[in-house]
Amino acid sequence: LFKLRNQLDVEKDYFESYISIASTVPSVLCLIGNFVLVNRVSASIRILSSLAVMLAVFVVITVLVKMDTSTWTRHFFVITIICVVIVSSASTIFSSSIFGLTSCFPMKNSQALISGQAMGGTVSAVASVVDLAAAADTTDSALAYFLTADVFIIVCIVVYLILPKLEYSSYLEGADESQGITNSSFPAKGTSVQNIPPLRPILTKTAVLGFCVFYVFFISIIIFPSISSSIESVNKDSGSLWTSKYFIPFTSFLLYNFADWCGRQITAWIQAPGPKSKLLPALVLLRTLSLPLFMLCNYQPRIHIKMVIFNRDVYPAVFIALLGLSNGYLGTLAIIYGPKILPKELAEATGVVMTFYLTLGLALGSACSILLVHLI
C-alpha cells in the first residue's frame, strides 16, 4: 500500500476491497475448472503446477519490491491486481486439490489442513506486528515477507513430492485400492477415470452444509478486512502508540486470525452440532448480526451513518474475536462434514465442491463489502 501513496484516493481508500475482489472472483472460475479436471488430471499435476505458478509470480513481486514505482503508480497498481488474480487462481487450484486429496483420508487430516491454514494467518499477523515495532525500512520489510513466501512455496513443493513415499499415505492408498476405489491423487498408485464426477448427487447431499460454508465466509469477508481494518480507537488522538499504531493490527488482524485458528482447532476435539443438525445452519445465520455490530463501531471515515453506539475500544475487540472464533469453528465443521456424507469414491470431488462453496462466499462477500463500505 505504501507504493500507492501517489495514487488516486479511490484506489488507496478501497485498496483492500479491490484486493478482495481480485483474489476471490477469479477463484470461482478456477474451482469450476478444477472440478472438471478431478478425474482427468491427477492431483499431483494440479498441485505442483499451481505451486510453480505461485512461485513464479512471487519472484516477480519480490523483484518489484526494490523497484522505484513512484513515477508509474497506476501501472504498478494494475500489475499488483493482475498478480493477485494469478496467485489467487493458482492458490485456489492448489488448496481445492489439496483438500480434495485429504478428503480421501480420515476426517482428522482435513481438520488439520484447515487448522493449519489459520495458523499460517496467525503467524503472518504476528510477523506483521513485530515488523511494525522493529522494522526501520518498509521496503526491506516487504522484501523479507516475499522472500519468506518464496522459500515456503519451495518447501511446499519438496514436501509434496515426499508425500507419496510416506508409509501413512501409501497405506491409505493401498486400502482404497483393495476396496476397488481409485482416485487421481498419486498417479503411480492408481488409474484415473476419464469422466467428470457426478455433480447432482454431490450438490443434493451437501446442499445444507454447502450453504453453511458459503454463508460463514460470506459474512466474514464482508467484515474482515474491509470494515474491521478501518475501525479506529476512540482514543486515537491521545498520542498513545497503542491507539495510533498498534490498535488496528492487534484488534483487526492478529485477534481475528488467532480466534479463527482457535475455532478451527476446537473441531479436533468437539464436533457438534452434527452434519444433519438444524442447529448448525441456525448458528451460521445468527452471524448476520455481526454486520450492524461492526457498522456501529468507530469505523472511519463515516459519511452516511454518523452514529457510533459502541464507542469503547473493547467492543470491536470482542466482536472480532467472536467473528473469528465462529468462522473457524462453524466453517470447519461444515467443510469437513461434506466429503464424509458421500461415498468414498466421490470424496475428492466433494472436497472440491466444498471449496467452491467457500470461494463463492468469499467472492460475493468481497463484492458486498464494497457496497457496505460506501453505505457507512
Image (cartoon, grey):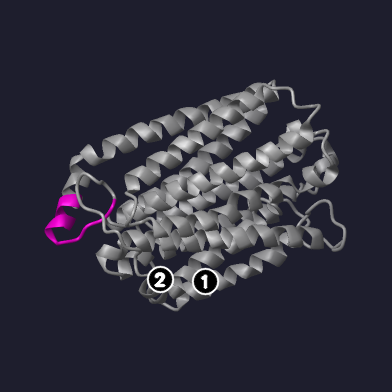
Marks 2 and 1, how far apart in space?
Answer: 10 Å
Q: Is residue 241 visible?
A: no
Question: Range of the magenta residues?
Answer: 173-184
Do tag 2 and tag 1 residues touch (Cβ < 8 Å)?
Answer: yes
- Describe residue 209's horizontal placement relative to residue 146 as left or right: left
Image coordinates of residue 61 in percent, x first then y, are 60, 30
Image coordinates of residue 207 in percent, x first then y, are 44, 74
Residue depicted at x 52% and y 71%: 283
Residue 95 vertical position relative to residue 355 in the rendered view, above or below: above
Q: Amino acid at mark 1?
A: Leu
Residue 123 versus residue 200: which sits nearer the camera?
200
Q: Which residue is mark 2?
A: 273
Mark 1 residue crowding within 10 angstroms, few (<14) / some (14–19) / many (20+): some
Of labels 2 and 1, earlier in sequence is: 2
Q: Helix, strand, or loop for circle 2? A: loop
- Which quadrant is the N terminus positioned in? top right
Residue depicted at x 56% and y 36%: 126
Residue 92 vertical position relative to residue 280 in the rendered view, above or below: above
Q: Helix, strand, or loop for circle 1? A: helix
Q: Which residue is mark 1?
A: 283
Residue depicted at x 31% and y 54%: 108
